[in-house]
Amino acid sequence: MDPLAELVKIDPKSIGVGQYQHDVDQKALKQRLDDVVLSCVNQVGVELNTASPELLSYVSGLGPRLANAVVEYRNREGPFASREALKKVPRLGPKAFEQAAGFLRIRGGVQPLDASAVHPESYPVVAAIAKDLSRPVQDLGGQIDLRRYVSDGVGLPTLHDIVEELARPGRDPRQEFEPFNFAAGIHRIEDLTAGMKLPGVITNVTGFGAFVDVGVHQDGLVHISQMAEGFVNNPSDIVKVQQRVWVTVLEVDLERKRISLSLK
């Protein structure tokens, strides 16, 4: 039920990141892919009491060795009651704790803020705001004069992030998902005829054009000459993979199973 937790167990290169992935510098490719996975994991956050070593290893400040140490400690001592308890893990020093704590989540723990993206170093300022407003820390939404709480250690942008997180705890960092539907009644290449205007999704971009899935189990080709009214130097300047587009069917070759499309 947690796709990210499973995907991190796979070398990103093995997922298939493009037909030219073997033509580029493999060390640079691995570093770039690892950086993307690291960014995803840290934006989403990690459940400290259920995460696998593979998932924990992508949390900033941990890495494989400390991730294994965290899981070993958890198996031996039981679930973590708070982020603070993480400091008891052998070899996990103050610097690693400082880097990792904000990305780790503990639901139902002794400190409600442990289930949020608020870093432990900001707990005192949250407690101060809650005290001034006579509200629990989980209910600090609404108008607050954050300028009163700016200090050398906590700036206004950080305060805005804290209040936003508390207003929408555990908010999903991904963009709103919009379901995509292919044209009704179009299921096979035989259903296509020249002149049809169809919704599609870009599946691959090459030097000579782009391939588009229109829902007939056979991608159609938009040749570079059919991508725009003017001259196109590089198809990547016009479209990108997974982009949703509307295309016009130019020609259907049933014998060779080829579909010619246009973006014009």
Image: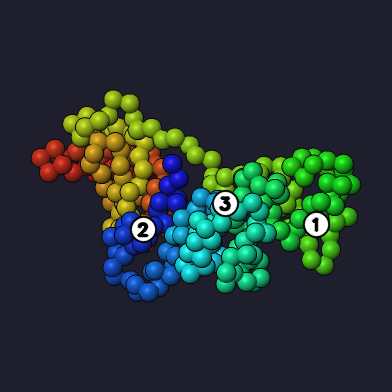
* Mark 3 secondary-structure assignment: loop
Q: Which mark is residue 199?
A: none
Q: Residues within 10 Å of mark 2 (few under 14, many from 20)?
A: few
Q: Horizontal and vertical percent for residue 174? A: 54, 47
Can you give x and y, in whole percent of width and height, for residue 97 in the image? 63, 66
Q: Quadrant of residue 235?
A: bottom left
Residue type beneath disc 2: Ile
Residue 202 seen:
yes
* Residue 10 tag number: 2
Give the mark nearest the N terminus, 3 or 2. Answer: 2
Q: Which of the two discs, 3 and 2, sits closer to the camera?
A: 3
The Cα–Cα distance between marks 3 and 1, rounded to whole angstroms, is 25 Å
Task: Give the residue type that dot 1 points to.
Answer: Pro
Q: What quarter of the picture does the N terminus occupy?
A: top left
User: Measured along the vertical axis of the image, is residue 94 above or below residue 132?
Assistant: below
Residue ID at (37%, 36%): 199
Q: Nearer the viewer, mark 2 or mark 1?
A: 1
